[in-house]
Image (spheres, rainbow, N blue to C red):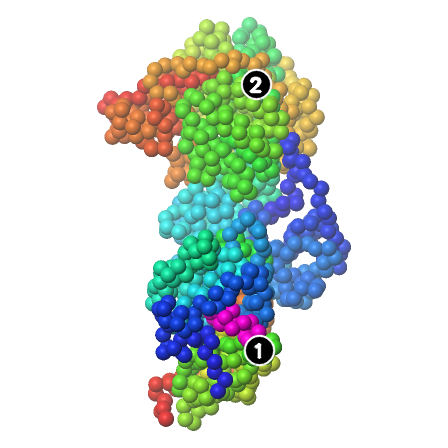
């Protein structure tokens, strides 16, 4: 369970903690100490004494004392006290084992079980159920009830993703408090009274949100269970592995459940990483795992040669790759996408010196962002520093959709009384709760006075800036960096766009504009793509044409891409949930992936394949494992200096930030290319490739689409159209239209995500501003 | 007979003081006049000196409670009148509201002056729809006359009252659940501390008192706290309203000076006694949530201490009388069903325990008891509920049943073996 005492202090700067008074007290005859203000239950836990709890969960706010499980005897206090809400006091004498305390534990459990169906053998929670565990440890051996228990029809769909079994509910309020006080979606409540209480939404509609699955993790019984995981496994048939979500750049820690070599479930960590996600994960991260088994997964190596297109063994495929890459005169290019661990990135750079002419070009997809270096050089912060900030400005982007768990931290800051301002061109889920500055598209600098005002008046301000938006407006980036430098107490968090960017940047891997030019110029003989599909990314059409001209293409990828059908050789890769290595989060936290399963027998890790290839090329690297690769890269790259793979443990460590690649770029205002409306790229939470590939998320997946303000749609004559044609200098696409009054006029909001929809390909590679013409789609285009 | 109509002033004036003019003719607003001549602190001290105790059930000294409100917090201070009157057998506040609403309004004005409140609320039970209309009309009339509004406490010193109707939950008589409900949330008790005095309505300092308590203030302030304190005995001064119901021939409300009347006098002299040939079997003297007492306790004086002396509480003053035609187990079952229905469900022992008690007693009454085993189960269950809950509702569920078992053990054992026949209904009984 969450324990605020175990929350690490501010990992970034700005997290200085004031000295705390220590209180001495006695629990069960043992002298213990705890910081003043600690609740008895936490003080006892820190001393290794378990006081059973159900409703207590500090992450949900102040204790509510509802379940009465934690009743203890305190000398000098009348009756029994709830240890969850009684702060430690000097010389307090507490017993959790007195006859009275034990009777209370036994009694509360007996009462909790009075109407709890003993259907543990068919309950998903059975075997990992706090009610079971505590009953065994603290509860009665047998029941004294002879009356029939209350029965409800079961289960009910609280939402397509969350199942509700009302009989099992012990009314601990955790889910309701999560909804009301953490996600603040205001949807869950209790209905009815007494032993008839039941969880419901106020409206009776399904529970909707971006974080609903956390109620399942919080539920101490089998009342709330995951529909996609329903009856999938029993706890004794599974293995849980702590890993990291590769769904966005936040790097939430999670736990992956494996059975039969498949990832069957993802949950928040039972021991949260307080510096990152605090144990909360978003629904996309939680239910994205069925993507691992989607039709788009590449399940075996494919070789295309004179014989034709056929599946080959992995060993043969690696040999073929070595054959294609070995000749000394070959000019090789390696393009990295996401997710790529730093070990794979490092091994790719090593590989580049061994393949072909030994001077292979290694580049990464992503936004060049040359104008961002001054911002990246600023002192950074970790997510838990947001808990201590007194003012937070979000400039650009939409963390609620793009770095979802950040929204929960921002809400927490707001509850605490911190000033939070959101500035940018997009409407966000936080708008009703905080100070909002809706900037005109392309004019982020208009929000700088707000930033100045907030950080000027604050003692511990944090600015969260969006990588894509600031990259498109280098003048605003330069001004923002200067502004923050003038307020030295300010810390900055980059809302990064891609999962691999921060890590690969720290390794000095540059972005791929020059590679595209080289491909177009016919200067590349062999292209190796690793988790990269440039054909669906920015300027995808140009990439497609360029790739068509490359003599040999080798693809390493988990999912089929625009490169797959063009490739001479396809090597299947494992997903991040099956892989091992380190990902660096947007706050610079290096965290370890641990393989939870290996769903695809013929797939391999990028690091494995790269090591194998160097051996086949006769120029082997000395590494056998990601740990060895990491120790070499840590020795070679300053950003990772001093980090030890083993010591990263389960919560990671922060790399040295602000020393990325790139020599700084022009800070001049950039003029958008093209004609028409300024394009505002948006990445909706349930809109990404994972959400599209996961059948579990089918009920919430968001289409790739164009968003227009009503007046804008009117002006363009598309108000009643279901789909529109959108054209930029980089291509055109026909996409569904969404008219939304919260959107700005004068802009086309491009909601990207589905790799098949071709929306991202309309954007420029350099991340610069672009304009688009939006109009009625031709009939045949609609049908197509 | 030591009956004194102090809170029930209307009984001295033709039973109706529902217009402001009538109320003022009956000496209304003289208490406020005296109060406004004092400083707020002196007014608080007067409450304290009068010895007035909270009339809602707990009997906590009103002046002390008011003195707990922190000053100068930078937040507004609220006075909330608890008109939820949901304790079974209690209907005393209803008469104040229906017949003498201005005394409540004046009392709230006095209390608000003392604690610095500009906006007070009356939380009235949802079932009291007509009574809420009386209050609304009275408040409108007081506002019209300037007794409420921008200059209610003097030029430029505003005070006003809003009536808020509950939605029919017993638990909302508990002060923190009432505040939750008043804030528009689900009515459930809050964890204390903080107490409402410090963090009450909307987290602000809040004085919350029963209708009768607040309606006691005008005579106290008019005739002086010493006059009030001189009535009754030292620890239980003043007058108290009793609602008598059950197997009596003249049920109704009675205002008596504390300590000067016995329970026997209340039942036999004021409430008309019992049906011929019937004897008192059991009395719940302070609403259904207090321990039940038997016929041997009828000579107890009606004040806080004396009732404690016979093992029960004065409570709300809702005195429920049962004669020897009734089955105590069936009555206990009925009470248990009430508490099961009204348990809010927030904390475990109450949510599950009240239901289980009702189930066990129901089995016993219906002849499905298991004899001594059920008696032992009941006794063990009492201890697992009482004192272990978030609010006193469950204690109130246990106490009348536990005391009934103590007092009528043989009957419980018999019913646990044989079941219970139906009691003789009041309407079928020959009335003399």
The circle on residue A716 is: none
Total number of numbered discs in the rendering: 2
Q: Position of residue B21 (x, y in %)?
A: 36, 68
Say if mark 2 contacts mark 1, CB within 8 Å: no
Q: Residues within 10 Å of mark 2 (few under 14, many from 20)?
A: many
In the visual, does B315 lie left or right of A561? right
Q: List the single residue furthest toward the left.
A: A779
* Above or below, comparing residue A723 to residue A96 in the picture: above
Based on the picture, tell me whether residue B229 belongs to the magenta stretch.
Answer: yes
Q: Which residue is mark 2?
A: A373
Q: Which residue is mark 1?
A: B230
Q: Residue at x 60, y 33 (%)?
A: A460
Q: Residue at x 66, y 45 (%)?
A: A5
Q: Position of residue B297 (x, y in %)?
A: 55, 86
Q: Quadrant of residue A593?
A: top right
Which of the image's four quarters has the C terminus of chain A?
top left
Comparing labels 2 and 1, the label whose residue is closer to the camera: 1
Q: Position of residue A598 (x, y in %)?
A: 54, 34
Based on the picture, tell me whether residue A648 belongs to the magenta stretch.
Answer: no
Magenta region, residue range: B209-230
């Amino acid at each position: 369970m969450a324990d605020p005492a175990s929350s690490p202090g501010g990992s970034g700067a700005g997290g200085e903690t004031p000295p705390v008074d220590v209180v001495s007290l006695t629990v069960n005859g043992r002298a213990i100490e705890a910081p003043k203000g600690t609740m008895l239950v936490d003080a006892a836990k820190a001393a290794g004494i378990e006081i059973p709890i159900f409703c207590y969960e500090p992450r949900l706010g102040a204790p509510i004392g509802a379940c009465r499980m934690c009743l203890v005897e305190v000398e000098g206090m009348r009756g029994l006290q709830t240890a969850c809400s009684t702060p430690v006091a000097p010389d307090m004498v507490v017993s959790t084992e007195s006859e009275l305390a034990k009777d209370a534990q036994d009694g509360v459990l007996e009462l909790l079980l009075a109407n709890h169906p003993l259907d543990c053998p068919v309950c998903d929670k059975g075997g990992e159920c706090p009610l079971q565990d505590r009953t065994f440890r603290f509860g009665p051996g047998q029941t004294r009830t002879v009356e029939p228990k209350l029965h409800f029809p079961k289960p009910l769909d609280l939402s397509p993703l969350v199942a509700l079994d009302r009989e099992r509910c012990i009314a601990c309020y955790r889910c309701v408090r999560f909804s009301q006080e953490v996600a603040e979606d205001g949807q869950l409540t209790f209905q009815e009274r007494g032993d008839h209480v039941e969880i419901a939404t106020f409206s009776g509609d399904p529970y909707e949100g971006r974080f609903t699955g956390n109620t399942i993790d919080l539920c101490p019984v089998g009342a709330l269970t995951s529909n996609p995981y329903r009856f999938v496994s029993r706890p004794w048939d599974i293995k849980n592995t702590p890993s990291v979500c590769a769904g966005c750049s936040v790097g939430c820690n999670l736990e992956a459940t494996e059975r039969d070599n498949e990832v069957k479930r993802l949950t928040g960590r039972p021991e949260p990483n307080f510096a990152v996600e605090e144990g909360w994960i978003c629904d996309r991260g939680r239910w994205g795992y069925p993507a691992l088994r989607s039709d788009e997964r590449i399940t075996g190596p494919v070789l295309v040669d004179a014989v034709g297109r056929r599946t080959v063994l992995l060993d043969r495929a690696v040999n073929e790759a070595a054959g294609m890459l070995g000749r000394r005169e070959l000019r090789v290019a390696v393009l990295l996408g996401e997710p790529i661990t730093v070990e794979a990135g490092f091994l790719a750079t090593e590989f580049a010196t061994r393949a072909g002419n030994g001077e292979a070009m290694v580049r990464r997809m992503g936004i060049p962002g040359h104008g961002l270096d001054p911002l990246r050089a600023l002192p950074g912060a970790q997510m838990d520093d947001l808990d201590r900030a007194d003012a937070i400005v979000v400039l650009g982007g939409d963390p609620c959709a793009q770095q979802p768990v950040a929204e929960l931290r921002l809400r927490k800051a707001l509850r605490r009384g911190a000033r939070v301002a959101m500035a940018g061109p997009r409407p966000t889920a936080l708008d009703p709760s905080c100070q909002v500055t809706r900037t005109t598209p392309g004019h982020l600098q208009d929000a700088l006075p707000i930033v100045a005002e907030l950080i000027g008046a604050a003692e511990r301000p944090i600015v969260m800036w969006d990588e894509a938006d600031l990259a498109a407006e280098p003048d605003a980036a330069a001004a923002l960096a200067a502004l923050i430098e003038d307020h030295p107490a300010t810390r900055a968090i980059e809302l990064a766009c891609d999962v691999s960017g921060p890590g690969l940047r720290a390794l000095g891997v540059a972005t791929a504009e020059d590679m595209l030019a080289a491909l177009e110029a016919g200067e590349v003989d062999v292209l190796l793509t690793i988790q990269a599909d440039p054909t669906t990314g920015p300027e995808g059409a140009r990439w497609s044409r360029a790739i068509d001209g490359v003599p040999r293409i080798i693809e390493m990828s988990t999912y089929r891409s625009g490169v797959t059908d063009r490739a001479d050789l396809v090597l299947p890769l494992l997903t991040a949930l099956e892989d091992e290595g380190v990902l660096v989060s947007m706050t610079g936290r290096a965290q370890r992936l641990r393989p939870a399963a290996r769903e695809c027998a013929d797939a391999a890790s990028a690091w494995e394949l790269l090591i194998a290839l160097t051996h086949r090329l006769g120029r082997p690297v000395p590494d056998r494992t990601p740990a060895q690769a990491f120790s070499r890269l840590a020795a070679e790259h300053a950003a990772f200096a001093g980090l030890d793979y083993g010591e990263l443990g389960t919560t990671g460590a922060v790399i040295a930030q602000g020393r990325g690649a790139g020599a700084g770029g022009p800070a001049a205002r950039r003029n958008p290319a093209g004609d028409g409306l300024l394009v505002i790229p948006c990445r909706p939470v349930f809109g990404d490739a994972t959400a599209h590939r996961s059948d579990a998320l089918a009920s919430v997946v968001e289409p790739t689409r164009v968003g227009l303000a009503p007046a804008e749609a009117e002006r363009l004559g598309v108000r009643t159209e279901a789909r529109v044609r959108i054209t930029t200098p980089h291509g055109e696409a026909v996409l569904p239209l969404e008219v939304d009054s919260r959107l700005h006029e004068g802009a086309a909001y491009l909601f990207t995500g589905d790799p098949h929809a071709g929306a991202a390909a309309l954007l420029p590679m350099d991340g610069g501003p672009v304009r688009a013409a939006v109009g009625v789609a031709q009939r045949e285009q609609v049908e197509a | 007979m030591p009956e004194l109509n102090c809170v029930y002033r209307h009984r001295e004036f033709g039973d109706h003081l529902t217009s402001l003019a009538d109320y003022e003719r009956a000496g209304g607003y003289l208490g406020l006049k005296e109060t406004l001549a004092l400083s707020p602190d002196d007014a608080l001290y007067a409450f304290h000196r009068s010895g007035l105790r909270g009339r809602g059930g707990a009997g906590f000294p009103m002046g002390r409670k008011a003195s707990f409100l922190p000053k100068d917090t930078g937040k507004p201070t609220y006075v909330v009148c608890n008109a939820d009157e949901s304790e079974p057998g209690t209907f005393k506040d209803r008469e104040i509201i229906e017949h003498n609403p201005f005394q409540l309004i004046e009392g709230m004005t006095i209390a608000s002056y003392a604690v610095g409140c500009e906006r007070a609320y009356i939380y009235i039970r949802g079932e009291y729809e007509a009574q809420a209309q009386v209050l609304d009309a009275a408040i409108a009339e007081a506002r019209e006359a300037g007794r409420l509004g921008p200059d209610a406490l003097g030029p430029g010193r505003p005070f006003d009252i809003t009536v808020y109707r509950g939605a029919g939950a017993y638990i909302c008589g508990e002060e923190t659940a009432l505040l939750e409900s008043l804030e528009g949330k689900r009515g459930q008790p809050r964890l204390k501390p903080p107490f409402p005095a410090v963090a009450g309505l909307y987290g602000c300092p809040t004085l919350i008192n029963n209708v009768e308590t607040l309606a006691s203030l005008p005579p106290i302030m008019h005739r002086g706290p010493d006059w009030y304190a001189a009535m009754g005995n030292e620890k239980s001064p003043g007058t108290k309203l009793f609602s008598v119901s059950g197997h009596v021939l003249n049920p109704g409300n009675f205002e008596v000076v504390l300590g000067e009347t016995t329970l026997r006098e209340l039942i036999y002299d004021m409430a008309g006694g019992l049906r011929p040939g019937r004897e008192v079997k059991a009395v719940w003297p302070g609403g259904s949530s207090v321990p039940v007492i038997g016929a041997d306790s009828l000579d107890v004086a009606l004040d806080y201490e004396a009732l404690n002396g016979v093992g029960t509480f004065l409570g709300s003053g809702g005195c429920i009388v049962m004669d020897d035609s009734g089955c105590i187990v069936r009555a206990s079952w009925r009470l248990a069903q009430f508490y099961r229905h009204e348990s809010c469900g927030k904390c475990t022992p109450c949510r599950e325990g009240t239901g289980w008690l009702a189930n066990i007693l129901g089995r016993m009454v219906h002849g499905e008891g298991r004899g001594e085993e059920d008696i032992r189960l009941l006794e063990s269950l009492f201890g697992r509920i009482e004192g272990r809950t978030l609010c006193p509702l469950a204690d109130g569920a246990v106490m009348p049943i536990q005391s009934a078992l103590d007092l009528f053990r043989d009957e419980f054992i018999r019913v646990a073996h044989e079941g219970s026949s139906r009691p003789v209904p009041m309407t079928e009984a020959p009335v003399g």
